[in-house]
Image (cartoon, rainbow, N blue to C red):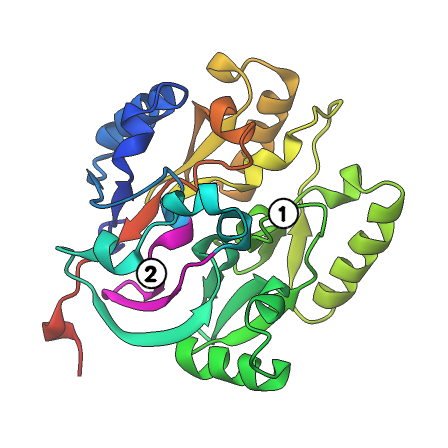
């Protein structure tokens, strides 16, 4: 544990000052304080969803990659463009190396990185192809591969989900496997075909385990995968205060199996969940750059 680098967990000030979610901020900060994890607020942000507009982490040595944050779900309505955070402005004052600028359009929520001893893999949805239609798909994948120093896996985008974010679909596990959300329980009707496509993309190519819960599912049971992993703990977004509902209890039990060496800390996050996000969406890991460790 002592050899694991601890990130500084960053949030937008709006998480603390916005009435519907300030309770989430309070519980989140209290959990981080108890764990000895530093946290801080970013500057020049325009909404609470900082995962989406901050640079993406390559490795925990302070190296990040920048991209163009221009989400269609905000950009396509002029009245919503005021909520688009300028990534450069939000990164001012941070000691990070952002010498890699990809110039591609995507959201940070559509970036799930899995680093292991052998290789790195980045999972994204294929919405990125639409967002960068000026670039042929094979050239785009090569550019992502070279820029991010990782294999690129493009997961099919669930078109019923407007954001196209991979961090609501998959997450890395400490044993090297990939955690897939509970589509095995929720896929019905047309979603069955989508679920089959997703399995075909992963099966035989990457070891994975599917989430499932031994209880009657609530509508927002997808939310648990949008957890925040910090050294020594998993901060789990929950649907009920005190994590008393059956779904929350089943999720806590499941995540304790998946993360046997970590404490599972439930955080009431329904105000975020009802707006389409979780704890991963409203946080960002900051590893200050130390040029002494670089070649």
> Quick one: which residue is furthest to the left in this view?
292
Evaluate if marks 1 and 2 touch, with contact meaning CB atoms under 8 Å apart.
no
In the picture of the structure, the residue carrying the numbered disc 2 is 55
Q: Is residue 36 visible?
A: yes
Q: CA distance from mark 1 to mark 2?
A: 21 Å
Give the foreground label among 1 and 2: 1
Q: Compared to 213, does 187 lie above or below?
A: below
Q: Tag 2 or tag 1, which sits nearer the N-term?
A: 2
Extent of the magenta region: 52-70
Answer with the quarter of the image where residue 67 lies: bottom left
State left or right for residue 135 relative to residue 200: left
Question: In the image, what residue occupies the spot 51% across and 41% down?
Answer: 226
Q: How many marks?
A: 2
Q: Residue at image x 52%, y 17%?
A: 243
- SS category of the residue bearing label 2: loop
Where residue 100 is drawn, which disc sits there? none
Instruction: Name the residue furthest front.
Output: 78
Q: Residue at x 41, y 59 (%)?
A: 69
Eyeballing the image, is 232 above or below 144? above
Left or right: 137, with 203 as reference point: left
Q: Position of residue 262 (x, y in %)?
A: 41, 39
How packed mark 1 is, by other alpha carbons closer than 10 Å (few <14, some 14-19, many 20 or more), is few
Please name whichever residue, 63 or 261, is drawn nearer the observer in this view of the structure: 63
Crowding near the residue tagged with mark 2, few <14, some 14–19, many ≥20 C-alpha atoms within 10 Å: many
* Residue 31 visible in the picture: no
Residue that label 1 marks = 162
Query: Quick check: 268 above or below 89?
Result: above
**Where, by quadrant of the figure, is residue 124 drawn?**
bottom right
Q: Could you tell me residue 39's position as x and y percent?
A: 22, 39
Q: Identify the secondary structure beneath mark 1.
A: loop
């Amino acid at each position: 544990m002592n050899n694991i680098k601890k990130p500084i967990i960053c949030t937008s000030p709006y998480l603390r000052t916005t009435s519907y979610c300030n309770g989430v901020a309070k519980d989140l900060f209290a959990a981080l304080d108890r764990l000895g994890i530093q946290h801080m607020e970013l500057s020049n942000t325009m909404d609470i969803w900082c995962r989406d507009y901050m640079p993406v982490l390559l490795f925990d040595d302070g190296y990040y990659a920048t991209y163009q944050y221009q989400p269609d779900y905000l950009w396509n309505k002029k009245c919503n463009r005021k909520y688009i955070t300028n990534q450069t402005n939000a990164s001012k004052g941070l000691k990070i190396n952002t010498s890699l600028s990809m110039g591609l359009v995507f959201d940070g929520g559509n970036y799930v990185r899995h680093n292991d001893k052998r290789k790195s893999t980045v999972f994204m949805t294929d919405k990125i192809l639409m967002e960068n239609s000026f670039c042929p798909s094979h050239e785009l994948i090569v550019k992502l591969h070279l820029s991010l120093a990782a294999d690129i896996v493009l997961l099919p985008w669930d078109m019923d989900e407007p954001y196209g974010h991979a961090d609501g679909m998959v997450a890395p596990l400490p044993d090297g496997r990939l955690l897939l959300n509970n589509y095995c329980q929720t896929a019905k009707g047309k979603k069955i075909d989508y679920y089959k496509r997703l399995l075909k993309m992963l099966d035989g190519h990457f070891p994975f385990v599917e989430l499932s819960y031994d209880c009657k599912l609530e509508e927002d049971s997808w939310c648990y995968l949008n957890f925040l992993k910090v050294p020594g703990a998993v901060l789990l977004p929950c649907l009920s205060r005190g994590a008393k509902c059956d779904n929350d209890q089943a999720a806590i039990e499941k995540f304790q199996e998946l993360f046997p060496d970590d404490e599972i800390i439930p955080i009431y996050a329904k105000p975020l969940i009802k707006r389409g996000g979780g704890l991963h969406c409203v946080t960002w890991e900051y590893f200050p750059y130390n040029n002494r460790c670089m070649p």
